[in-house]
């Protein structure tokens, strides 16, 4: 029996069955490459679902983690630590200019964002009647009860009710429906700058600015979930900065790529929203610990030093053109290509078994993922090379030549 087979049997025996992991056990990685425990090499164009923005085992991040692990890992937020303060300063100065709260994941960040928005409206603005959240159909904000409550996909919510209320859902980027939904009871409008798990859905130009203006005019807060789009993935440090740099949202959540693979989440909020969190109102035992903060600071250093935001923009355009080429070659199989930066998707015809397409690519040594049920998602490390993107697209082309069907 191979080492991998033995581990897979143990996983089947001891792990809960809330995942459907591929039958692969990874042992090591470097850059955009992974090797399983039996030594087989894979090209990783998934990046742990848009997490490993600087690739695997980047020497700058690895050294920072090792150095910090040998110095001090955790003291809790009963005390200050210098790395959390430095990280907050850098993130705030490069986003909303306000303040930061740190936690451990995207779902936790979105929970904090919802809590601080409600408390700001009730305690800072003195509008206790404004408790309603307006969210988007097709959205994904996490698996906790609060995050599920604002996630606009029934498959994630089924069996977990009753959920947090009141929440209204409107079609993503439908300005008419949003204008009708936002009322004098609306606390905040929550959306992703582009939908990731919903299928790499990009809003029409001007949508975010129109929503910003609507929220301002109606007295509601604008909240952005940048868990998947943040940390350079779409061509700027945060996706909103390409259209709302001069009129930003009131708050945003970030996680996934924040610490290059070490679990970390955060919310970045304006000074007004920050007033919603007074001592004792919210907390996270591990939030902003020294180890995660060291990893995040090193990740930011690499993003800047290697110009990964600019790289995501240019290589993302190259990838988009390549995926549009697959649509032109196989119009009965692939119907559209869409995305921004290095978050791109190839939309499959409903007759194609998209998960099976991704599985076939994995069998050929290329890791991709499924978004929205029928979209092949590319979310590679931002250090990916042109040759590696070409390799991935080439393998996908081979699979689509004789695609698995539903």
Image (cartoon, helix red, strand yellow):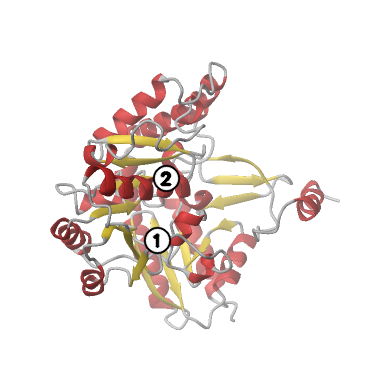
Residue at 40% across, 23% down: 83
Q: Residue 156 in the image: x percent, y percent?
A: 53, 65
| Element class at badge 1 | strand
Q: Quadrant of the C terminus?
A: bottom right
Label 2 crowd bin: few (<14), some (14–19), many (20+), radius 10 Å: many
Q: What mark, if any, has residue 344 been given in the picture?
A: 1
- Residue 157 in the figure: left or right of residue 24: left
- The answer to whether 390 is drawn above or below residue 175 in the figure is above
The one of 13 and 27 positioned closer to us in this rendering: 13
Tell me how far mark 2 sits from mark 1, CA to CA.
24 Å
The residue located at (19%, 54%) in the rendering is 243
Mark 1, other Cα within 10 Å: few <14 / some 14–19 / many ≥20: many
Between 3 and 297, the one lying in front of the other is: 297
Q: Nearer the viewer, residue 33 or 116?
A: 116
> Does any portion of residue 216 appear in the rendered image?
yes
- Residue located farthest toward the top when viewing the structure as drawn: 71
- Disc tally is 2
Q: What residue sits 38% from the left and 77% below the top?
A: 328
Horizontal and vertical percent position of residue 117 = 31, 48
Left or right of 341 on screen, residue 247: left
Do the residues under discs 2 and 1 have CB atoms within 8 angstroms?
no
Residue at 37%, 62% in the rendered image: 195
Left/right of residue 128 with respect to residue 392 in the rendered view: left
Q: What number is the disc on residue 250?
A: none
Provide the secondary structure element on which disc 2 rests.
helix
Label 2, on which residue? 109
Return the disc, 2 or 1, that comes first in the chain's sequence: 2
Observer-nearest residue: 383 or 387?
383
């Amino acid at each position: 029996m191979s080492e991998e087979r033995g581990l897979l049997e143990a996983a089947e025996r001891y792990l809960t069955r809330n995942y459907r992991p591929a039958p692969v056990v990874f042992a090591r990685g470097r850059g955009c490459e992974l090797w399983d425990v039996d030594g087989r090499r894979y090209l990783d164009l998934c990046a742990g679902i848009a997490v490993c923005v600087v690739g695997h085992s980047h020497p700058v991040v690895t050294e920072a983690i090792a150095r910090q692990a040998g110095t001090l890992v955790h003291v809790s937020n009963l005390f200050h630590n210098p790395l959390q303060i430095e990280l907050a300063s850098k993130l705030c100065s490069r986003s909303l200019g306000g303040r930061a709260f740190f936690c451990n994941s995207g779902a936790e960040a979105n929970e904090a964002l919802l809590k601080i928005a409600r408390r700001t409206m009730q305690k800072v603005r003195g509008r206790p009647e404004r408790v309603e959240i307006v969210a988007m159909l097709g959205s994904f904000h996490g698996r906790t009860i609060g995050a599920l409550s604002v996630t606009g996909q029934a498959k994630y919510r089924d069996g977990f009710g009753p959920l947090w209320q009141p929440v209204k859902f409107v079609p993503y980027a439908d300005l008419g429906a949003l204008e009708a939904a936002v009322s004098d009871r609306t606390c905040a409008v929550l959306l992703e700058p582009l939908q990731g798990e919903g299928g790499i859905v990009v809003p029409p130009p001007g949508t975010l600015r129109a929503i910003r203006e609507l929220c301002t005019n109606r007295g509601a807060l604008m909240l952005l979930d940048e868990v998947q789009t943040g940390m350079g993935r779409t061509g700027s440090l945060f996706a909103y900065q390409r259209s709302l740099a001069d009129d930003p949202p009131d708050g945003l959540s970030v996680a996934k790529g924040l610490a290059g693979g070490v679990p970390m989440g955060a919310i970045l909020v304006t000074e007004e929203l920050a007033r919603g969190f007074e001592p004792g109102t919210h907390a996270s035992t591990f939030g902003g610990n020294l180890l995660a903060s060291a990893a995040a600071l090193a990740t930011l250093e690499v993003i800047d030093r290697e110009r990964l935001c600019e790289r995501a923009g240019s290589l993302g355009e190259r990838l988009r053109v390549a995926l549009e080429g697959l649509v032109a070659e196989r119009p009965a199989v692939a119907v559209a290509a869409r995305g921004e930066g290095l978050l791109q998707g190839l939309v499959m015809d409903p007759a194609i078994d998209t998960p099976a397409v991704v599985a076939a690519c994995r069998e050929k040594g290329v890791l991709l993922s499924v978004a929205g049920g029928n979209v092949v998602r590319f979310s590679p490390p931002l250090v990916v090379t042109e040759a590696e993107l070409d390799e991935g697209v080439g393998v996908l082309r081979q699979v689509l030549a004789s695609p698995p069907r539903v």
